[in-house]
Image (tube, grey):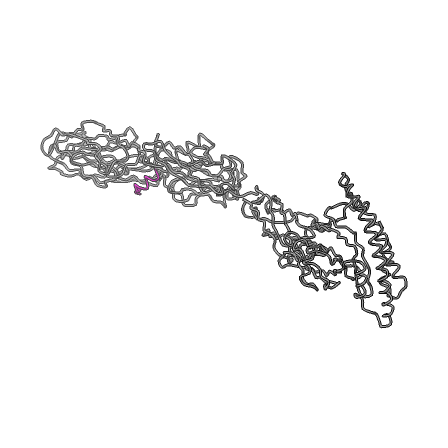
Amino acid sequence: MRMIPARLHRDYKGLVLLGILLGTLWETGCTQIRYSVPEELEKGSRVGDISRDLGLEPRELAERGVRIIPRGRTQLFALNPRSGSLVTAGRIDREELCMGAIKCQLNLDILMEDKVKIYGVEVEVRDINDNAPYFRESELEIKISENAATEMRFPLPHAWDPDIGKNSLQSYELSPNTHFSLIVQNGADGSKYPELVLKRALDREEKAAHHLVLTASDGGDPVRTGTARIRVMVLDANDNAPAFAQPEYRASVPENLALGTQLLVVNATDPDEGVNAEVRYSFRSVDDKAAQVFKLDCNSGTISTIGELDHEESGFYQMEVQAMDNAGYSARAKVLITVLDVNDNAPEVVLTSLASSVPENSPRGTLIALLNVNDQDSEENGQVICFIQGNLPFKLEKSYGNYYSLVTDIVLDREQVPSYNITVTAADRGTPPLSTETHISLNVADTNDNPPVFPQASYSAYIPENNPRGVSLVSVTAHDPDCEENAQITYSLAENTIQGASLSSYVSINSDTGVLYALSSFDYEQFRDLQVKVMARDNGHPPLSSNVSLSLFVLDQNDNAPEILYPALPTDGSTGVELAPRSAEPGYLVTKVVAVDRDSGQNAWLSYRLLKASEPGLFSVGLHTGEVRTARALLDRDALKQSLVVAVQDHGQPPLSATVTLTVAVADSIPQVLADLGSLESPANSETSDLTLYLVVAVAAVSCVFLAFVIVLLALRLRRWHKSRLLQASGGGLTGAPASHFLGVDGVQAFLQTYSHEVSLTTDSRRSHLIFPQPNYADMLVSQESFEKSEPLLLSVSSIDDTCFNHLLQSPPNEDFIIPLFLLQLLIGFLP
């Protein structure tokens, strides 16, 4: 005989109830898979070919994620992936799982994960005769009054057999005796209650005790039996049995009662007096679970709790109490206790399928998790609602039975929210309501949906010219909100040409860092800016890119020295001569040094200064204009030839400069120049001294004639000048003005003004020649064409063959034609 632990029996009964509930849901929602197995199978015993019933091969069970959804505390079945069979996971005892049930069926759910489909399986456990009938009390003592009437019945304890059907209790048998017989009463629930019937009057003096054996037998094969020993004590006469006030007692109590709470009181009375009227109460028929929960006070008849009530384990208890006096007379009454449900169980949420991440471009309605929600309470206390806390882009959809699907409600964007912490709350409708929170962490997987972005619409950088090769110019950085390889950026330059050369010959870019490097040295005078287009491309599939414009500005450096434009050095290496009359007043403009600088800005700002002079203090140079003026009046003692060294310096760092040497001839008249001209030359040899003397005498004579001629000519010109003044006063104007020129170098314009003198001499040893500049001083700018029209005298002078005149001075002084030719030049120059 096997005793079933009450606690284990209670656990399995809850599992059976859950299985029956899920089985009902399966019958209404989908086709059931049914198997039937006997109880007491060994672990690993085959229940059925589940792979065949699912339409799969055995190897596909693991590939398609077929598994049993756990339910309850004990897993009774398992899947054999090798054979594709449903097997037992342990010993199956029908009496533990389905105590008192006519049909014992177990329900389980099988999940196919790749289709997220659930199949219901119903396993019927068939009973075998593995339990013998047994009596809770193996020995029983019955007291019977000696005056008990024949045919009086005395209830005997009934036997228990957990098996069902023919394997359950079928009959009772009493050992042979002369006074008693056995009658079996059938209860409304099919139970068999043995009763001892007095067939022959008792005589205590003849026999005070009778020993009987009650045997209970089931209908199994082989037959199993259980026995109880009965000792009948013969008492003195007591002819009244106790009687209950009512045949049935009912009570409804909540399941959360405290231990020791009194539920009800049963009351039986005996008409006898004295000790024969004393009644003792006891349970006559009570199952093991009720015996662990309720207690009956034998003296007062009070029924109280000694264990915790749980509506989910058992909502109804039926017991039979007995009242017995000292004579052994007894009475029976039923006690029915209903356990009312209270909301003491929070909903249970089980994640049967869960995705840890989802791509950000997944469509709306993508499945994230499958949840099974259950509440062990009943009615409103067991009605569960599920919702998601917070404003999240997910929703719950009712699936099959108590299953909910957690799906996306919108298309997710990882760049906005990279991960979500989802809290699913399951709350029942009890009072107060109970709830359970389930936390789900979901990562949003990145897709390449964002191109690289530059923080600026365009970039600009400045670099000094003459930069070394390989120097870094500027760094451009793009940001890609994607992650991992989708955010890895490669930089490159768009193809372009600059002044016929490829852009790649000037600059390059680091493909990883975006740093731009110079491949050549830039020259500000060659080009001043460089337009570059930088492209940033990520490594996604497909790759995305963006462009940005970069302007490189070349900064000017002081790398060009000033250039002297005027006076220009003759190509033959001679030095130009400027004329300053001895009658010049202080501030008289002798000439102007004109220079330009190819640089720009302050690097091209020029200043002039007199670096060296043969007669210090005689001349001064304008700091910003370059004009050479007399600083004081010229004296007779001042030398005819004055050498000036003028320095032109820019304002760069460091400053650069250039110098020019000016030769100024100091003379009041042409004859004086001619007279002093010989002093500029040194005799070639002693043999030419006499010829020089003759030349000097001839020049003096000619000078006298020339002076007379000049006086007459000056008078004529003075008269003509006076007439022109009168014409100007009457409204006429001079149409001529000296010529001037603008020279520009790289946008820098230098004003060149021609200063005219009566006679300018240029001397060099044995290669002297005369230069006749245009004879006027002007402050107005006119075109070269108007000047040529208004000055016929200058045209005639410029039209003379300079080669002939140069040949005059370059020839030796003893040539006969030098004086006539010289005079001819002078006369032509002074003609009207």
On the question of residue 104 being in view, the answer is no
Q: Horizontally, is 671 left or right of 596 in the view? A: right
Residue toward you, 761 or 753: 761
Instruction: Check the image and name the residue furthest to the left.
Output: 274
For residue 521, which quarter of the picture? bottom right
Instruction: Check the image and name the residue furthest to the bottom.
Output: 686
Where residue 597 sits in the image (x, y, percent)?
69, 54
Q: Horizontally, is 810 left or right of 111 in the view? A: right
Count every numbered label the image shows and give the total. 0
Which residues fall within the magenta stretch?
A: 1-13
Where residue 586 sits in the image (x, y, percent)?
68, 56
On the question of residue 715 being in view, the answer is yes
Residue 89 drawn above or below residue 616: above
Residue toward you, 382 or 107: 382
Q: Which residue is drawn at 84% across and 56% down?
A: 708
Asked if the magenta segment contains residue 314, the reply would be: no
Residue toward you, 319 or 774: 774
Q: Horizontally, is 760 left or right of 561 in the view? A: right
Asked if the magenta segment contains residue 7, the reply would be: yes
Instruction: Check the image and name the residue furthest to the top.
Output: 246
Overall secondary structure of the magenta section: helix
